[in-house]
Image (cartoon, rainbow, N blue to C red):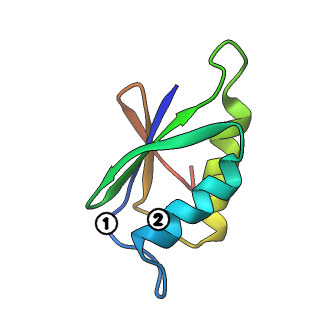
Amino acid sequence: MDLKILYTTLPDGMDQAALKRGLEQVLEEDGWLTGSGPGWVELELEDERQNPKYGILAVKHYLQQAQLPPDTQIELTGVAVGIYE
């Protein structure tokens, strides 16, 4: 399952490389980064046959703990939702 993170800014002291490193640690063997560009990072969550809810929640939790701004969104199957919703 593809998950895209859309952001306008990152917290002070964090650049996109640090965001990607943090996401790689959160995903471990449950997914991987597939692409990135200005204002977005795309991930592939492992094993679509199982409920991907846990991977999605882990990513949202990481983004909240890293204190990304409230306008940050995750997009699944073309539907974007805020990380604090």
Q: Residues within 10 Å of mark 1 (few under 14, many from 20)?
A: few
Q: Secondary structure at mark 2?
A: loop
- The outermost residue toward the left is 38
Above or below 14: residue 74: above
Q: Nearer the viewer, mark 2 or mark 1?
A: 1
User: Is residue 53 or residue 19 the one in the foreground?
Assistant: 19
User: Is residue 60 or residue 19 the one in the foreground?
Assistant: 19
* Image quadrant assignment for residue 57: top right
User: Is residue 5 or residue 30 the one in the foreground?
Assistant: 30
Residue 55: x %, y % from top left: 68, 38
The residue that label 2 is drawn on is: 70
Q: Is residue 69 left or right of residue 21?
A: left
Residue at the location (57% across, 64% down)?
21
Q: Is residue 22 left or right of residue 2?
A: right
> Could you tell me how far apart the alpha carbons at marks 2 and 1 are, in whole angstroms?
10 Å
Residue 10: x %, y % from top left: 42, 74
User: Is residue 6 or residue 45 the one in the foreground?
Assistant: 45
The residue that label 1 is drawn on is: 8
Q: Which mark is residue 60?
A: none
